[in-house]
Each structure stands twice: as C-alpha cells, then as structure tokens.
Image: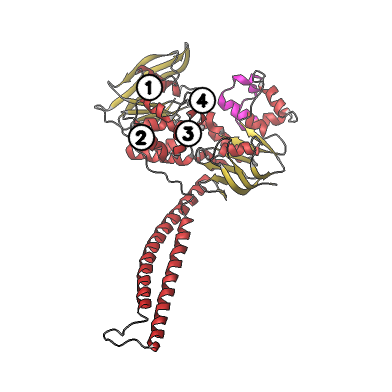
Amino acid sequence: MSMINVSQLTFAYEGSYDNIFEEASFRIDTDWKLGFCGRNGRGKTTFLNLLMGKFEYSGTISASIDFEYFPYTVQQPQFNVLSVLSEIVPEAPLWKIEKELSKLAVGLDVLERPFASLSGGERTKVLLAVLFLRENSFLLIDEPTTHLDIQGRETVARYLKGKNGFILVSHDRDFLDECIDHVLSINKANIEVQAGNFSSWHHNKQLHDSFELAENERLKKDISRLQAAAKKTAAWSDKAEKGKIGFVPGGRIEKSTGRRAYEGEKSRKMMARSKAIIERRERSANEKSDLLKNIDTADKLKIHPLKYHASRLIEFDGVSIFYDSKEITKNVNFTLHQGERLALVGGNGSGKSSILKAICANESFRHEEAGFSNLTCTGNIYIGSRLIISYVPQDTAFLAGNLSGFAESRQIDESLFKAILRKLDFSRTQFEKDMRGFSSGQKKKVLIAASLCQKAHVYIWDEPLNYIDVLSRIQIEELLQEFKPSMLFVEHDRAFCRNIATNVIDI
C-alpha cells in the first residue's frame, strides 16, 4: 500500500482566466477502487492528465507508483492482438494474458486477429486485461463503458470488482456501484474523498445538501429578526442617550446630576445590547456565507411533446436492414404507441442504431451527422402521417461553431436553448466558445438541449447519455418521468432503462 498525495494543486489551461483546480489537497490510497464523479467540464480527465505529467501545474503531486492511462493508444493496430499486448507488457507470460482474457469473457482466438479488426468493446476488454498485468502501476480508467453494451458492462464491472488500484471515470450508476469502494468527487467549491460506492455517496450528498438548505433558511430568518431587533434597540439607545440631560418627564424641573448617572447607565446597557445583536447578526451572516457552496442546483427541465391523432406512431413488420448489401439486422418487429417509451436492447453491432436511422431516413429526417449513407431496408416500416420526430444521434463529432449559429441552423429558439444548457450546468462563458473545444459530455448536452426545444410527437434518442455526468442523467430522467413523451431510444445505462422504458425490445 502507498499513497498518492495531492497538495495545493492549482491548474488552468493556457489562455484561460479560470482555474480548473485551485489549491486542491487530498490523498488517495493506491489499494482503493476509486470512482471519479463530477459534472461535465469540472476537470476529471484533466486531473488524470495531470497525474500522467502532461501539463505543468503549481502545487505538488507525489506518488511512488507509475500511472497507466486507459484507453491506451495502440501504435501498430495492424499487428495481431498478441503482438500488441506483448509490446505493452513484454514481461507478462502468455498464460497470464489468457487468464485475464477469460475473466473478461474474451475468446482466446482473438489473440490471432489484427487489433484493428476488434470492436470497440473487444478493444476495451483486451487492453484492460493487459494493463492490469503491469507491475507497480495504478490505472487511470477514463470512460471504459463508452463502447460496451449492457452485458459487456456487467462483465467489466465484475472484473474490476476483483481488482485493486485504479481511478475509474464513469457516469453509469450501476457500473460504479458494482466495482468501487471509494468516491473522489469534484464539487463546485472543493474536492472530497469518501468511502463507499456511488449510491452511498449520492445519498450522503442529498442529506448534506438538505441540511445546508434548511440551515440557510433558518439563518436567513435569524438574520432578518436580528436586523429588526438591532434597529429597535439602537433607537432605544439613542433615545436614552439624548435623555441624560434635560428636564424630568412631565415637568419643568431640570434633571439633577444624580439622575444623569442613572440615565447614562441605562444608555450604556442599551448600546451594549445593540452591539451584541449586531455581532450575532454578523456571525449568522458569516455562517450563512459558508453554506450552499457545493450544492449543484439542478433546475427542472421541460419538454413539449405533441399529441398525435392516433395511438399507433411507428411500426416495424419483418424489417431487415442492410449497409452496402451487408445485412445488419433481420426480421425486426415492434410497434410504438403514443405514450410508450421503448428501449432497443442488444449487443454491439446488433443494429439498434440502424433501426433508428431507418425511421429517420424514411421520413427524410437526414442530418449530415446521422450517417444514413448506403442504408437500405426490406419489410414494412409504418410511420404515422405528418408525424414530427426529434432525433438525437449518437455521434457528436460534427459539432462546430458557436451555440448561436447552431440554434439558428436548427431553427430553434436561442434563448430557450441556452436556458436549458444553463440548467444542464453550462456557464455563460461557454456560450461564445467554439463547440469543438467542448468536452464529449457537453457536446451531448447540446444535442439533448436542442431536442428538448423541439415540439415533437416522438423523440428518438441514440445513446443520449454517452459521457453525460450522473447528476444531469438524473435531471433528464426526472424530466421524462414527469412529462412522459413518446420515445424510442437506445441506451446501455441500466438504471436509465429501468427507470424510463415502458417496454424493452430485444434486438
């Protein structure tokens, strides 16, 4: 066991006036299975890069181990998998590699295949297996679930549960709960480390936020009451001070010098009482200023689903889909009725995204980012007449330019669009930035915010939660549970499917 010590860490990107980290200090045990949580853009990947020594910073990061970053960059992907893995960990014997691959349900025949021919999920598994074989290393695992289907996520979660010594960046709640024992969270005002899994951390955060909100309300009332009391006591004190010299009340007899001492003592007590009330008010104000700094306000989102004149919206009857004459999926059958939220579930490459694209292509709902080229279908696809569809594609690479131009190109209300992004934790400074500089999660939020601006009969979302932080996922879930729009979606987040889908279509 050893410790990673972070002391007074301060970092900002070149040309930026905003610090990503400011005098952050904490310690990490290298035996922990550490989940890394925080809103998009808070600096999770940046911190991993700082551990890897990629940027200069002030403060200190000390550790007696080596850091290994995942996803690892393979320099010669045309080589077979065994050659690639042997180059990464030349000291690892073949039997150890085979043992790790079997734990990840990867067939040993994969070792003879070119690395470039592997699917995203297969690459994730083989690289995780070999990186854990490196001695004296601490793994920095950044978003491993991106290319994994539900079954693959369950397999990798079980695998990581049996390992020690890693930081895991993931926004999948079930995945985190399965395999971590500590949480490192980047909050608005600080960074904290807590024992437990994601659910226990989130529960504790909710309790703490509720306490601070209640304490804030109590102190607000206390300050208001003390302000009124201070004003009243100050008025009494002024009156008593003015009354030290003059005439006795009710007559024309001037006050004696003995009377003046009594009046002076009365004035002094009133002034002392007024000063004490002011000091109490200032203490309450200081206590109040220490509250709410770490509360991530998640304002409620809204959506504007349209009512369709018929129950049946979309139907697939014996549909097969082809790309360049290659069959992607065969004999698909389902019906989407108004008010239903259907989740398409299946392994990687089973054709889930192709089904969504077939619907949008059939309606001439083409965007350059959607990837409809060379897609053909057989069978019957029914789409309701004049059915309005709002589509969120899986890919975000096409996003470029500023948000105002994007809103104009999509013909959506710019003010509403930016208001939704503010609720999804966008700062106003991001509104003028080029979207190419956004994090992956922020790009996905742009597409979701655009969809929420659209009044539609059906919302078709393809892996909408990729890279999106947990708190925003919960926001989106609460929205869909409240407004209950008609939806057809693909998503590998088990918690999201469990909470949102009215039915599951297994592809």
- SS at mark 4 in the image: loop
Could you give the CA–CA distance between mark 1 and mark 2, rounded to whole angstroms?
40 Å
Q: Amino acid at mark 1?
A: Asn
Residue 500 seen by the camera = no
Q: Which residues are magenta?
A: 101-126
- x, y (%) of residue 254? 32, 86
Residue closer to the observer: 173 or 162: 173
**Residue at the outermost left position:** 309
Q: Amino acid at mark 4?
A: Asn
Could you give the CA–CA distance between mark 2 and mark 3, rounded to whole angstroms?
18 Å
Could you give the CA–CA distance between mark 1 and mark 4, rounded to whole angstroms?
19 Å
The residue wearing badge 3 is 442
Q: Quadrant of residue 506?
A: top left
The residue wearing badge 2 is 415
Q: Main secondary structure of the magenta part?
A: helix
Q: Quadrant of residue 449?
A: top left
Q: Amino acid at mark 2?
A: Ser
Residue closer to the observer: 495 or 38: 38
- x, y (%) of residue 138? 67, 39
- SS at mark 3 in the image: helix
- SS at mark 1 in the image: strand
Crowd rating for badge 2 (residues with CA inside 10 Å; few <14, some 14–19, many 20+): few
